[in-house]
Image (cartoon, rainbow, N blue to C red):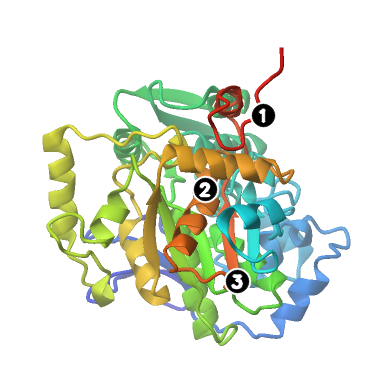
Amino acid sequence: MNESAFLKCINPSCGLEYPIYSKNIECERGHLLDVKYKKTPSTELKELFYTRRNPQGSIFNESGVWRFRELLNFCQIDTSNQEECSKYLVSLDGAEGRQSKPYQMSKVADFVGASHSGLWLQPEGYNPSGSFKDNGMSTAVTHAKLIGAKKLICASTGNTSAAAAMYAANENMECDVYIPAGQIAPGKLSQAYQFGAQIVQVQGNFDDALAKSLDDAKHHDGYTVNSVNPFRIEGQKTIPYRAIEYLNWNPPDWIVYPGGALGNISSCGKALMELYEWGWIKKIPRIAVINSEGASTLYDLYNGNFEETELRWNKGSPDTGLIERYYKHLDSKGIRPKTKATAIQIGRPANILKGLRALEFTNGIVEKVSDAEMMDGMSIVGLNGFDCEMASGASPAGIKKLIEKEVIKKDDVVVGILTGRQKDSSLPVDYHNNPQNRFAIPPRG
């Protein structure tokens, strides 16, 4: 294989490789794939990335994803050539990731018990479709375009459908969106309709919708853009890139994410593994994943709350039987994921193995928070003048709980990712109409 980029199975004992033009999302033995690069990028690129903050008329310099294009050059193009970039790279006029960087929020710091200087929150809701998904969608659709795909397919609890439909419309592609009937915030679903997607309603939850979408993509020539797609993971790597670059390439002590399908955790882990291997960073931040109490699969398995066995990546030999037994347990008890934070209402995280790998590499941890705690987290972010959805409130809520447990130290440098903006208007309205809520500002008569 002569290409500088290729696909490789994540299982070390398997290691099957495929050309970059493959549409496979897993190897023939059923393991997920990584995009791999043969060349080690020079640290001198750090200065180039910094100079691109003045885009000089290039939307690819303006883009918070393609500004780092040398670190995700799976198209194997001359990244300095504007014509080649325009031919191959998919961008919504440079908007994806453009406004994404860490901010200090004093009210949130006081709420969680952290120092004002040590807590940073990175709002990904300022992406064009309103969530972090645009980072990965730009790269996934770039690969779809590279291999000549005509139709995108995804399952969604809302944000993925908005991002997929938006990029599909911009690239004149079809888009089929599989949704769990009646379980998506209208504000998110309306975006998919607005961008011209074909909605396919599935009876069941997100996990059922994903299974149906993957089956249809496999048998009806669609291109899957859920986070099991390794090219989507490449774009989402730029979330920690931007955070660490903003801190002058001095990694924080912690990076904290809400946990749903675990694509973000997988992408962050891959980014950190590569940056460390390339010699770009000397310190490895710890990843903290925050589950909802109502969708706590990773929390339960990682912390040994099921069969008293802690699930680990185990250097590439995880106990997948434990995962299957847990899922059978959920089915036998009729337990379904249930939380008002629908973006992370996922019981069978498709990227659980890549997530475990990320946690092992970073000595990471998994915590869970209640809906009430997430609502408080969402609301205090709003009182700092920033917008985020309920699932994003898991980040400040989780940081607060981990500081109280003294897992995160008060003077640690922490970057919490706010994954999306508010698209369910009923949540903040209901929260503030109830004077019992901690940060409620009820209306006056």
x, y percent for residue 111: 60, 52
Vertical comparison of 293 with 306: above or below: above
Disc 2 to disc 3, C-alpha distance: 44 Å
Q: Which residue is mark 3?
A: 413
Q: Which residue is mark 2?
A: 148
In the image, is 41 to the left or to the right of 203? right
Vertical comparison of 169 with 118: above or below: above
Identified by mark 1, the residue type is: Ile
> Going 63% across and 50% down the picture, which residue do you hit?
124
x, y percent for residue 51: 82, 73
Identified by mark 3, the residue type is: Val
- Disc 3 crowd, CA 10 A, few/some/many (<14, 14-19, 20+): many
- Disc 1 crowd, CA 10 A, few/some/many (<14, 14-19, 20+): some
Note whether residue 205 is visible. yes
> Going 13% across and 43% down the picture, which residue do you hit?
329
In the image, is 350 to the left or to the right of 95? left
